[in-house]
Image (cartoon, rainbow, N blue to C red):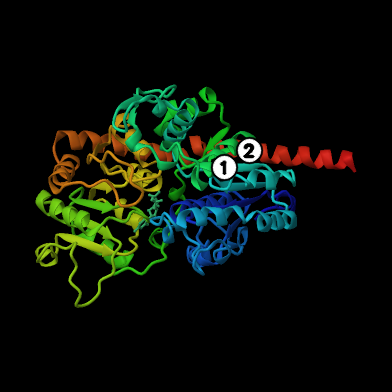
Amino acid sequence: MKSKNHHHQQLHIFLFPFMAQGHIIPTIDMAKLFASRGLKATIITTPFHAPLLSSNTFQNDTVSESHIDVLTIEFPSVENGLPQGCESFHMVASSSDLLPKFFKATTMLDSQLDHLLKRHRPDCLVADFFFPWATDVAGRYGIPRLIFHGTCYFSLCATLCVYRYAPHKHVSSDSETFVIPNLPGDIKFTRNQLPEFQKNNVENVITKLFKASKEAEERSYGTVVNSFYELEPVYADHYRKGLGVEAWHIGPLFLYNKSNEDKAKRGFMEPSNIDGHECLKWLNAKRPNSVVYVCFGSLADFNDAQLLEIALGLEASGKEFVWVVKKEKQEGVKEDWLPEGFEKRIEGKGLIVRGWAPQVLIVGHEAIGGFVTHCGWNSTLEGVCAGVPMVTWPVSAEQFYNERLVTQILGIGVGVGTQRWTRLVGDSVKREAIEKAVNRIMEGEEAEEMRSKASALGEMARKAIQEDGSSYLELNALIEELRLHRTDCGSNLQSMG
Ligand code: UDP
């Protein structure tokens, strides 16, 4: 039981994620973490994602529901030339026409945020990197604004160094390599692998937003990072001391989902042909480390030709697999991405999940011995914690940076060979490359070495969030700072009064 006094002092944190599953999911995890430490957390979202928040309810053993609230704001779709109800990033991500309109619409959420902050006066606002204007809105009420980028220290450092020193402007072609300046580790990159907003010299809504976000970083209270110190100590130090950004690492956030039920429900919005229970049953019948898990996150949208290569590559590898494909089955319709007779041939050996997979449950199962991933940060971290080697297949966002962390710095993965940032469709990869990379992470000396490094990191991750672990202590430090900030503001207000 908490004392009345304690309750009186409860800190209240507002969380405002970008409207994409890869951002909302870790934000829900973060809310659970704050609530488990006695803080009150309120998540702001738009109507489309509200069911995701209520279905990933906060009723588990560690968290009392009363500590987490959800507030809904309207998303100005129609006003910005988007279809009615178009308020999730995955609905616009592949459209060069809708994408800028979507980002424009997000900038119009400021007055609703202002209204909520004025009314609720939280002690802190954790708002997504994509909302640079949130810093100033929070500032009007003396509320410190923390930024959540949703990625690791390594990629935060790399992004900042490319932004500050612009090495890509000094190469003569998109495929010429350059070393990222002031980034430890001799990281070589090409312009082809940079996100569009960093690569382009043109000014558009997205590049402007990126610039505004970078500028807002300098005026914000700091950054919260979904990572843990032991994973990337050099980059955690470099980001803070070398590059001078205030930051707190409090991850891996997904580890705060303790029960299988919480894990199975995580992020679940779309229908799926299979539920968590069935997946586990299927995996339970397999030998440890014998199955490869293949999933490209919530956004990647490969064409049929690429999916066909994946199917043939997996089959040629001879490995058992769970493959998540975002395609619904339509009875009687021939599916060009499925090789002739494939489903029959793989019966019992391969499981195709159509729709949303309970990824944390699957990847953490002992039968899973490797993970083919697009290197979204959430997936990457889930792979690390599961102790599995990875085939890295970056597509867009900051995924090419994440790949480098996995392959070059941590030595727990091998690249499939993608060279080009291409929003969602991905650089094309042939079946032979897929087969080879899958075999490299699943069997042999190299695979065993990677697996043992990854397991050691997974162990460290679990320790990091335990009492007195590195992430636990960072969160203590952050909470303490926020308390002090509140006391300071309170006394300033009193002296003004
Ligand atoms: N995810 C899942 N089931 C799926 C696809 C994705 O549970 O079928 C989860 C995955 O576990 C991760 C998140 O969705 O937590 C995806 O985030 P990530 O950063 O990996 O990639 P993004 O979707 O942002 O590209």
Residue carrying label 1? 147
Residue carrying label 2? 220
Q: Residue furthest right?
A: 497
| Residue 5 or residue 10, whichever sits in front | 10
The residue that appears at 53% across and 28% down in the rendered structure is 240
The residue that appears at 40% across and 47% down in the rendered structure is 378
Under mark 2, the amino acid is Ser
Q: Is residue 320 visible?
A: no
In whole angstroms, how far apart are the C-alphas of marks 1 and 2?
7 Å
Using residue 261 as the reference point, say whether residue 447 is left or right of it: left
Sort mark 2 into few (<14), some (14-19) or many (20+) by Cα contacts within 10 Å. Answer: many
* Residue 43 location (% of width, % of height): 58, 57
Sort mark 1 into few (<14), some (14-19) or many (20+) by Cα contacts within 10 Å. Answer: many
Q: Residue furthest bottom?
A: 332
* Residue 154 location (% of width, % of height): 42, 33
| Residue 190 or residue 172, whichever sits in front | 172
Using residue 36 as the reference point, say whether residue 496 is left or right of it: right
| Residue 69 or residue 480, whichever sits in front | 69
Q: Is mark 1 within 8 Å of ligand 1?
A: no
Which quadrant is home to the N terminus? bottom right
* Residue 195 location (% of width, % of height): 40, 40
CB contact under 8 Å: marks 1 and 2: yes
Q: Is mark 2 within 8 Å of ligand 1?
A: no
Q: Classify mark 1: helix, strand or loop.
A: strand
